[in-house]
Image (tube, rainbow, N blue to C red):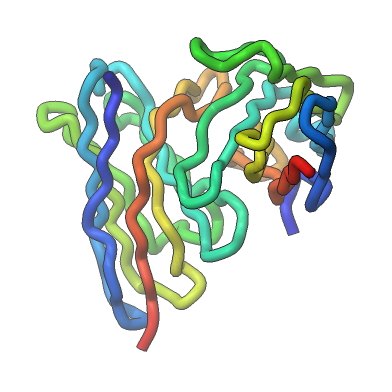
Amino acid sequence: QSVLTQPPSVSAAPGQKVTISCSGSSSNIGNNYVSWYQQLPGTAPKLLIYDNNKRPSGIPDRFSGSKSGTSATLGITGLQTGDEADYYCGTWDSSLSAGRVVFGGGTKLTVL
Amino acid sequence: QVQLVESGGGLVKPGGSLRLSCAASGFTFSDYYMSWIRQAPGKGLEWVSYISSSSSYTNYADSVKGRFTISRDNAKNSLYLQMNSLRAEDTAVYYCARDRGTVVTHNHDFDYWGQGTLVTVSS
C-alpha cells in the first residue's frame, strides 16, 4: 500500500491529452514539492517534472505538472505511442521522525 | 555526460550479505546527495536510503533500517550499499540515483539514474 495514491492505469488515443493524479496528505504532498518519473519498459526511471511543475532540460512541453493542496497531477498532451510507460509521482513525507521519500504505486499509460 | 553504473548484484541466500557499488562520472560527485532506490519484480519504486554530499547525514527506509548501510567515497566517485541479513522481500533491481535534495530542503528528486543491478534473495 503506497503512501501516495495513483490510478493503476489510464489510456487515451494518439494525439489526445491524459492526466494522471497523485493523492497524498499534509505530511507529504501538502507541504513538499512533487516530482514525476517516466519508466519505459525495461529501462530506468527518468525525471519528467520536479518542484511540482518544472521540466528538466530536454523534456518536451507536452509534459506538465501541477499541485493543489494534497494532490498533484501530471498532464501529457499530444499523446504518442512512445509515451506508453509507467509513471510515478514522488515527494518527501514527514509523518515519521526521520522523514522519508515516498512514491506513488505507479500508473500504466496505454496509448490506444 | 552524467553516468551512474551499478554493480555487485547477484543471487544470495536469505540471511546473507551483499555490497552494491555505483560508479559516478560526468559531474562533481562530492556536490550531491545520492540515493538508492529499488524496484521489486513487477512492482513500483521504493526509496531505500540517501547520503549527504559529505557523508554527514544518512537516512533509511524503515524496511531496511538496521540491516543496510549506505556510504560513499568522494575520492573514488563511488556510492555503496552494504546489505546484511537479506530477506526474500529484498529481491529487487537496485538503482543508484543523483539526489537533488538536502537535509534542509527535503527537496528530494532524482535527476539521473543508473541502469540498475538485480539482487535476488533465494535459497
- Residue A54 lies, in percent from the top left, at 64, 12
- Residue A97 lies, in percent from the top left, at 62, 42
The residue that appears at 51% across and 39% down in the rendered structure is A45
Image-based side of B113 in relation to A6, left or right: left
The residue that appears at 65% across and 32% down in the rendered structure is A91
How many numbered circles does the render carry? 0
Image quadrant in which the C terminus of chain B is located: bottom left
In the rendered image, the vertical position of residue B80 relative to residue A18, given as above or below:
below
> Which residue sits furthest right?
A69
In the rendered image, the vertical position of residue B18 relative to residue A46, given as above or below:
below
Image-based side of A19 in relation to A96, left or right: right
Can residue B57 be seen here?
A: no
In the rendered image, the vertical position of residue A111 relative to residue A60, given as above or below:
below
> Which residue sits furthest bottom?
B123
- Please state which of residues A56 and A83 is positioned toward the viewer in this rendering: A83
Image-based side of A48 in relation to B16, left or right: right
Can residue B79 be seen here?
A: yes
Image quadrant in which the N terminus of chain B is located: top left
The residue that appears at 60% across and 33% down in the rendered structure is A37
- For residue B50, which quarter of the picture? top left
- Please state which of residues B81 and A89 is positioned toward the viewer in this rendering: A89
- Residue A8 lies, in percent from the top left, at 79, 52
- Residue A106 lies, in percent from the top left, at 69, 47
In the rendered image, the vertical position of residue A54 relative to residue A101, given as above or below:
above
- For residue B66, which quarter of the picture? bottom left
- Please state which of residues B120 and A109 is positioned toward the viewer in this rendering: A109
The residue that appears at 38% across and 82% down in the rendered structure is B122
